[in-house]
Amino acid sequence: MSSATIESRTPAVRSFHLTFSSAEEVHRGLENAVKALIEAAVEDGTCGIRVTRHEAGTYTVTLDETVPFGETYEDVTA
């Protein structure tokens, strides 16, 4: 089972904090979060998407102005 905490800086969703309890959930959960942020990125038009793995099963997916529009970057902090 996964859970998502949505942090909103504007009326549009700008980031997701995701926690997964199994490896099988990770791919689908991240794919859904990125898909949701693509829509927000298109509306914004100035930023891309950054996916960060903090530890096993814990990720953030955010709109990031340091990522070029139309691109998705991946980071690992742990």
Image: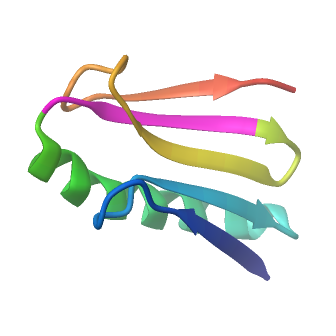
Residue at horizontal 25 percent and vertical 30 percent from the top = 47
Work out which quarter of the rendered image holds the C terminus and state it.
Answer: top right
Q: Where is residue 31 in the image (x, y as percent from the top left)?
A: 47, 59
Q: Which of 76 and 65 is in front in this view?
A: 65
Q: Is residue 51 magenta?
A: yes
Residue closer to the observer: 63 or 21: 63
Looking at the picture, how far across and down is residue 32, in whole percent?
Answer: 45, 67
Q: Quadrant of residue 75?
A: top right
What percent of the width, then of the height, locates residue 38?
Answer: 26, 52
Where is 19 relative to 46, above or below? below
Q: In which quarter of the image is residue 29?
A: bottom right
Q: State the residue at coordinates (22%, 46%).
A: 41
Is residue 25 depicted above or below 41 in this figure? below
Q: Where is residue 12 in the image (x, y as percent from the top left)?
A: 29, 64
Q: Residue at position x 47%, y 43% from top?
A: 62
User: In this picture, which residue range is highlighted in magenta?
Assistant: 46-53
